[in-house]
Image (tube, rainbow, N blue to C red):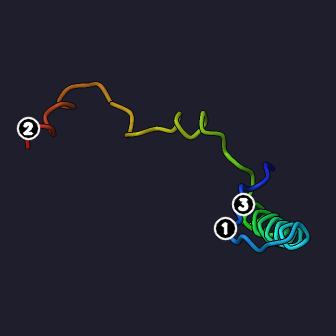
Amino acid sequence: MSSPDIRVVSPSATPEDIAAVTVVVSQALAELAEELGAADGPEVSAWKRSQRQLRSPLTPGPGAWRSFSG
């Protein structure tokens, strides 16, 4: 998992403050990702998602194309 980008905008934040906030936020995000990952099951790659069927297969034969004219 990559580290989240955290931006501190307070000019009075000390390095200890920044470290503490970073640890808390990172841990919260890691726990959330773990919960979501466990609930969803195995992750499907984008390649497999793009290979799903978009429509039902065509069935050749007499009269098969008549339903398109309404």
| Foreground of the two, 59 or 38 | 38
- Circle nearer the N terminus (2, 3): 3
Q: In which quarter of the image is residue 39?
A: bottom right
The outermost residue toward the front is: 12
The outermost residue toward the right is: 16
Q: Which mark is residue 9?
A: 1
At label 2, the amino acid type is Ser
Dot 3 lies on which element?
loop
| Foreground of the two, 63 or 27 | 27
21 with respect to 55 (left or right): right
The residue identified by callout 3 is: 6
Dot 2 lies on which element?
helix
- Mark 3 to mark 1: distance in Å? 10 Å
Residue 17: image location, x then y, percent: 86, 73
The residue identified by callout 2 is: 69
19 with respect to 36 (left or right): right
Residue at point 79%, 72% (across, down): 13
Q: Quadrant of residue 36?
A: bottom right
Residue at point 77%, 74% (across, down): 12
Q: Between tags 2 and 1, which lies in front?
A: 1
At label 1, the amino acid type is Val
Eyeballing the image, is 41 above or below 61? Answer: below
Dot 1 lies on which element?
loop
Eyeballing the image, is 42 above or below 6? Answer: above
Residue 47: image location, x then y, percent: 60, 33
54 with respect to 42 (left or right): left
